[in-house]
Image: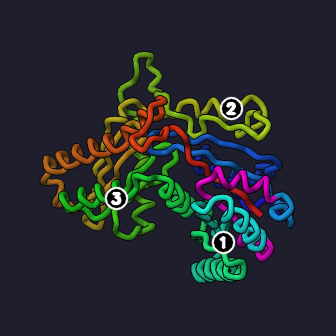
Amino acid sequence: MRRSGKTSIQKVVFHKMSPHETLFLESTTKIIKTDISNSAFLQFEVWDFPPPGPTEFTEQASKWASVFAACSALVWVIDVQDDYSESISRLQAALVVAAHANPHLTAEVFVHKSDSFSEDQKFEAQRDVHEQLAQEMANSRLNVPLRVFLTSIYDQSVFEALSKVVQKLLPQLPTLQNLMDALLAKCAGEKAFLFDLVSKLYLATDSSPVDMQLYELCSDVIDVVIDVSYIYGPREANGSGMVTMPASVSGAKDAAGGAAGAPAGDGAEAEEWSGMPLADAAAQSSAVIRLSTGSVLHLRHVNRYTALVTIMSDRTLAKQGLVELNFQHFKEAVRLLFEPAQAGAQGEMTPGGSSAHQQQQLGATES
């Protein structure tokens, strides 16, 4: 059962491919390893596997055990528009191997291509998948952490789902959440997101529930700020206005070591992502947008590739000094929080005794 959409998810989120262009992608036929190294906040690998055979996890258990032992999360993509009962059975077989090979592995299920469903149909499909998985795991006496997400590349749902997957790979997440809670308390804020500018995944948020409409609004503001900064920001000495951002895919290789991820031909995609059209001023730029609800949306860059987007009361605009002071404290706290990881990326050892440049790995597969 090919073409469930896992490669399309990667292309849309990490390569900025248009969802409509993914219709022409070929099915995955070999393992593709993609290195995501946008910043100290976001460093992991994605292993894209071809669809497994019906008995692959039982007949080749030792091979898959070595794969799962190296992974931090297993992302299983299900085409909700197709009969997914067999896919769930294969996932159950995979979890049996994974549970023995890596007790700390978490499983994330994307109920994909749900955009054509009504709201009731979406939640019914999500509930059905979750119940079938729970029954399969109970029959196998498995105790693997499992989450089920409704996703589509035609809206923000896939970004939110991947954001939550990535957050579980961040050991600093509880501290980041506490910092954002404190910032909102000091500035009369309503909601805050810490975004990776390259992928537009949110790496952390405060402890209040996430409203999808607010998340979509904050995500759209990032595009506005980048576009405006590129057009009106000061140019570099060469007049190009271009700055080099880390390619969302800094290295993509197949299992045989060959290049992967770039389209066939002259590697135009790799050239496109060696630098993004982001003006140098964007790293210091900010945005304040008053909403029709009376709230204010405030964007500030924490570092070159990470931005804090907050929803605040319009009364906060009269206290810009207070907001600036608290933001600078937040920015400094985040810098200190990730300083050991940045040192580890240069080959030093973190206080915990392990090199911080050893990246997390995400295994993505479909059925």
**Inter-mark Cα distance, 1 to 3:** 34 Å
The residue carrying pointer 2 sits among few (fewer than 14), some (14 to 19) or many (20 or more) residues within 10 Å by Cα, namely: few
Q: Nearer the viewer, residue 211 or 98?
A: 98
Rendered residue at 63%/59% (across/down): 102
Q: Nearer the viewer, residue 364 or 240?
A: 364
Is residue 94 in the magenta section? no
| Percent of width and height locating residue 324 | 19, 46
Task: Give the residue pinned by disc 1.
Answer: 116
Magenta stretch: give its range: 61-86
Mark 1: secondary structure = loop
Rendered residue at 32%/35% (across/down): 284
Task: Give the residue pinned by disc 3.
Answer: 177
| Percent of width and height locating residue 150 | 59, 70
Mark positioned earlier in the residue sequence (1 or 3): 1
Q: Is residue 64 above or below residue 207?
A: above
Three-letter code, disc 1: Ser
| Percent of width and height locating residue 161 | 54, 62
Q: How is the image coloured?
A: rainbow
